[in-house]
Image (spheres, rainbow, N blue to C red):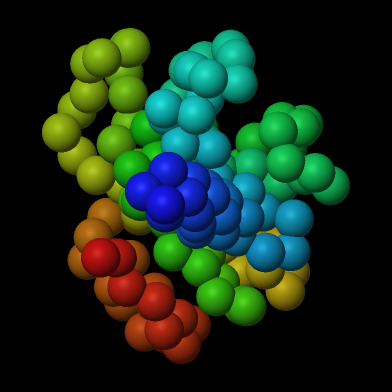
């Protein structure tokens, strides 16, 4: 009985984590831990657009994407721009993607990001 419960919990966790990667409209987030697992050459967290998951033909945001949120109209992303592997500036950059016209706005400072999300009626927040 305990094995069934554990198995069910693992399956549930797998499907719950899959939803975090698919951002809708062909946009995907590849977390750093998964980039290493699937053999992405740069071993970095990215945001990309593709007809299928794990086909990295159109990288939208490179670097170290540390958080992503999305809804049916927008994607917001936060990135720590790596200078070299395991070396960063300490400055966080912000991005907005408008899905309707595939436009990328950024990198932005936190202040400009907040102003832009208000101007564009983006109703998303980072956790």
Residue found at the far right of this picture? 51
The answer to whether one can see residue 17 in this image is no
Which residue shows up at 72% across the image and 41% down it? Answer: 53
Q: Nearer the viewer, residue 18 or 60?
A: 18
Coordinates of residue 3 in the picture (x, y in percent): 42, 43
Q: Nearer the viewer, residue 102 or 8?
A: 8
Residue found at the far front of this picture? 1
Which residue shows up at 50% across the image and 29% down it? Answer: 34
| For residue 9, side relative to residue 93 (left or right) | right
The answer to whether one can see residue 14 in this image is yes
Residue found at the far left of this picture? 90
The quadrant in which the C terminus is found is: bottom left
Q: Image quarter for residue 69?
A: bottom left
Coordinates of residue 29 in the picture (x, y in percent): 54, 45
Decide: is 90 above or below 42.
below
| For residue 49, side relative to residue 107 (left or right) | right
Decide: is 108 above or below 48.
below
Which residue shows up at 19% across the image and 28% down it? Answer: 89
């Amino acid at each position: 009985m305990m094995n069934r419960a554990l198995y069910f919990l693992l399956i549930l966790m797998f499907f719950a984590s899959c939803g975090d990667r698919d951002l809708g409209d062909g946009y995907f987030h590849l977390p750093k831990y998964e980039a290493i697992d699937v053999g992405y050459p740069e071993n970095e967290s990215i945001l990309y657009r593709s007809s299928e998951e794990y086909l990295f033909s159109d990288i939208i945001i490179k670097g170290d994407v540390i958080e992503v949120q999305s809804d049916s109209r927008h994607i917001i992303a936060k990135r720590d721009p790596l200078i070299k592997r395991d070396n960063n500036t300490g400055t966080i950059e912000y991005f907005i993607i408008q899905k309707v016209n595939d436009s990328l706005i950024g990198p932005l400072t936190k202040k400009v990001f907040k102003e832009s999300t208000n101007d564009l009626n983006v109703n998303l927040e980072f956790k």
